[in-house]
Amino acid sequence: MVGVGDGPRGRREGFELMRILDRLVVGTFLKLFVVFLAASPILFILGSITEELDTFVDRGLTMGEIARAYLFQLPLYVQWSFPVAALLAAVFTVHGMTTHREIVAAKAGGVSFHRVIRPILILGLILTGVALVLTEVVPRSNRIAAGILQSEEVGRSWRSDFVYHAEDGTHWQVGRLDASEGTMDQVVMERRRDGSGRGALHVVAESAQWDSIAGWTLTDGWVRKLHPDSAEAAYHFETVRMAGMTERPEELLETPREPDEMTYGEIERLAGMVQRSGGDAKELLVKQEQKLSLPVATLVVILLGAPLATSNRRGGTAYGIGISLSITLFYILLFKIAGGLGEAGAMGPLTAAWLPNILFAGAAVVLLARVRT
């Protein structure tokens, strides 16, 4: 560093100065982040209550029930607030240091801009990890909140004339499913030969009953087996348990739980079931990837906002809010457009979910490279 000696004492002084600078950057960023993170969920809650108040009144919900439901929804609003709060904190930290010539002073001392914002980037990585943890917490709290607010739509508990492909490779054709009773009628199951040496299997049953321990049990039907050596065997049965069919009755319905109430793994499982049933799972796959891409946006917007905040224009608070608002609105716009294109099949789910982050990260790399260090 310039301004200190080159010997051991100079190096110690330089190291101490860097520690002071890092503490200044970290302290400023964290104070701003906490303030913005505390304020943002309140705005989300007020907006939601304003929009849903009539619905809550119609359902006869008390103020205590509404307050308790929004308390359980707080992790969701905190997760939404992470990128916004991180962006505002980064912009105001860097812009404040630029306005007060602290960035210039650091450069004069031989400290590059990239080194100055390194603590912010490290904090961004940590906050991204916290946001990813919230991804597993939010669905569980949302389920509780939905139960309190009675927001689950009462859908039909039956389904008729559908085909389902189980994970073990068997094909099921069902005449009627009654999820409330845990029964299926007119069941046909087929399993074709495969390279593992399994023979073909064809089962026809009048009905099937679900048990939480035993699984599905077929009743009153016929089994026809075709062995690998082409020998055939057929017999009638009164009851037989089908271990390969592990899906619960409610999982076979057409109207599953909302993606916001499912974890990443649960959406993956549901998407696989929809695909095996011959359905379209593109929307679920996009939502699944967005559960990861949105938390990562916390780091991406920091990378983009920090170099943008180095402008020497004196706009103070208005300038910082303007930059942050522009980035946030543009990101949301891209997020919605890319997600819609992914759900429509115009692009793959992975591309649709991560495209905003890729574009913003690319712009951030360009801006960071152009910053005068």
Image (cartoon, rainbow, N blue to C red):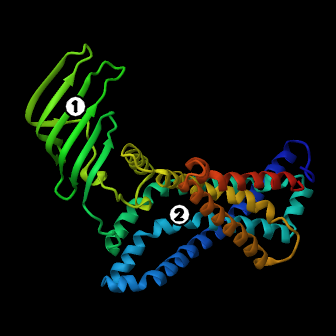
Asked whether 149 or 126 is in front, the reply is 149
Residue at the (36%, 64%) spot, across then down: 143
Please state which amino acid type lies under the numbered disc 2: Gln
In the rendered structure, the answer to whether residue 155 lies left or right of residue 288 reads: left
Label 2, secondary structure: give it: helix
Asked if 225 appears above or below 215 in the picture, the reply is above
What x and y, as percent, mark residue 58? 33, 85
Residue at the (63%, 65%) spot, across then down: 332
Which numbered marker is on residue 79?
A: 2
What x and y, as percent, mark residue 105? 89, 62
Depth-wise, is mark 2 or mark 1 nearer the camera?
A: 1
In the rendered structure, the answer to whether residue 323 lies left or right of residue 71 reads: right
Asked whether 137 or 248 is in front, the reply is 248
Please state which amino acid type lies under the numbered disc 1: His
What x and y, as percent, mark residue 137? 43, 58
In the rendered structure, the answer to whether residue 150 lies left or right of residue 25 reads: left
In the rendered structure, the answer to whether residue 66 lies left or right of residue 355 reads: left
Asked whether 75 or 97 is in front, the reply is 75
Q: Which residue is tagged 1? A: 202
